Image (cartoon, helix red, strand yellow):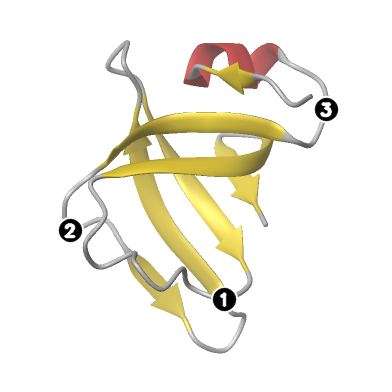
Amino acid sequence: ASPYVTIAQAKSASGDRLHLAGDLVKDSTKTDIYSRVLSFRIKDAQGDVVTVHHHGEKPANMQKATKIVAVGKMEGDVFRSD
């Protein structure tokens, strides 16, 4: 099973299948069409904010989302999701 973590926990946790849940920060979504990376920011329940780089297809319901779960790992100050 993969754990749900806060941003603070993700920064100190090992593993690459961490579930980071939070609010999608309004107007933070950007897509790099060349590298196929979707960038956005998540604010967790503790008020911490982190940038997520999602590699792969943009989720179909991303335009309507207010809450989000990213699955991946921290790399430096960025959470990498696939």
Amino acid of disc 1: Glu
Nearer the observer: mark 2 or 1; the answer is 1
Distance between the alpha carbons at the discs numbered 3 and 2: 29 Å
Q: Which residue is mark 2?
A: 27
In this view, the residue farthest toward the left is 26
Measured as percent of width and height from the top left, residue 45 is found at: 31, 16
Q: Residue at x 46, y 68 (%)?
A: 59
Residue sitting at the far bottom: 34
Q: CA distance from mark 3 to mark 1?
A: 22 Å
Give the mark nearer the N terminus: 3 vs 1. 3
Q: Earlier in the sequence, mark 2 or mark 1?
A: 2
Mark 1 closeness class: few <14, some 14–19, many ≥20 residues within 10 Å? few
Q: Residue furthest front?
A: 1
Residue that carries the numbered disc 1 in the rendered image: 57
Residue 13's x, y, as percent? 73, 16
Tell me the amino acid under the disc marked 3.
Gly
Q: Is 34 positioned to the left or the right of 73 in the image? A: left
Q: Left of 17 or right of it: where is 47?
A: left
- SS of the residue under disc 1: loop
Residues packed near mark 3 inside 10 Å, few (<14), some (14 to 19) or many (20 plus): few
Q: Tell me the quadrant of the picture where the C terminus can be found.
A: bottom right
Quickly name the residue at label 3.
Answer: 15
- Element type where label 2 sits in the image: loop
Q: Picture coordinates of residue 44 (x, y %)?
A: 35, 23
Q: At 58% across and 79% down in the image, what residue appears?
A: 36
Residue at 49% x, 21% y is: 7
Q: Nearer the viewer, residue 21 or 32?
A: 21
Marks 2 and 3: in contact by CB < 8 Å? no
**Dot 3: element:** loop
**Distance between mark 2 and mark 1 Cα atoms:** 19 Å
Q: Residue 11's spot in the image, x, y percent?
A: 62, 20
Question: Quarter of the image holding residue 62?
Answer: bottom left
